[in-house]
Image (cartoon, rainbow, N blue to C red):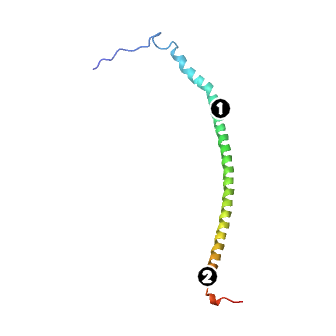
């Protein structure tokens, strides 16, 4: 069989930390427990600020949409008026073409 290597032991006062083994592990959770409420409070505050910013942006966008809808209504009304004017011009042009193509002898004389 293979020989087992030398048995390793912890040497007190060695190159490691001067803090005893058992004292470091409990400090971390206690420190973490101390900062956890503050961390959660900070995250909550950050979320509330973000929510406020987004709500303000949503209000601004809603106002912009309302303005654009009003502009769209104005543009649609102008387009309808323009189409009606074009139809009136077409009717007038058709009447003029009809008069031009009419036989001059058949027109009533005074």
Q: Quadrant of the N terminus?
A: top left
Labels 2 and 1: the sequence-earlier one: 1
| Residue shown at the point (65%, 64%) measured from the top left | 79
Q: Secondary structure at mark 2?
A: helix
- Picture coordinates of residue 92 (x, y %)? 65, 76
**Distance in Å between CA atoms under marks 2 and 1:** 87 Å
Q: Vertical placement of 80 versus 3: above or below?
A: below
| Picture residue at 63% right of the left edge, 87% below the top | 104
For label 2, count other residues whose C-alpha is less than 10 Å away and answer few (under 14), some (14-19) or many (20+): few
Quadrant of res 38: top right
Vertical relation: 65 (above or below) 84: above
Question: Could you say where residue 73 lies in the image, as x and y percent from the top left?
Answer: 68, 60
Residue 57: where, in percent of width, then height? 66, 44
Determine which residue is flagged by label 1: 41
Count of numbered badges drawn on the protein: 2
Q: Quadrant of residue 14?
A: top left
Badge 1 density bin: few <14, some 14–19, many ≥20, Cα 10 Å: few
Q: At x 42% / y 13%, what residue is drawn?
A: 9
Q: Is 29 left, or right, of 4 in this rendering? A: right
Residue 72, disc: none
Front-most of residues 42 and 105: 105
For this orientation, the residue located farthest to the right is 110
Q: Quadrant of the C terminus?
A: bottom right
Q: Determine which residue is flagged by label 2.
A: 100
Q: Nearer the viewer, mark 2 or mark 1?
A: 2
Q: Does 4 sit above or below residue 33?
A: above
Dot 1 falls on a residue whose secondary structure is: helix
Q: Nearer the viewer, residue 61 or 21?
A: 61
Q: Nearer the viewer, residue 93 or 19?
A: 93
């Amino acid at each position: 069989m293979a020989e087992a290597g030398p048995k390793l032991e912890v040497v007190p006062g060695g190159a490691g930390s001067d803090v005893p083994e058992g004292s470091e592990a409990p400090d971390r959770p206690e420190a973490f427990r101390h900062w956890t409420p503050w961390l959660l409070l900070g995250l909550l505050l950050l979320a509330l600020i973000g929510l406020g910013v987004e709500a303000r942006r949503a209000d601004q966008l809603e106002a912009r949409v309302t303005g654009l809808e009003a502009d769209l209504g104005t543009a649609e009304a102008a387009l309808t008026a323009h189409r009606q004017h074009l139809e009136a011009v077409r009717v007038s042009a058709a009447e003029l073409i009809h008069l031009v193509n009419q036989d001059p002898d058949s027109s009533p004389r005074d």
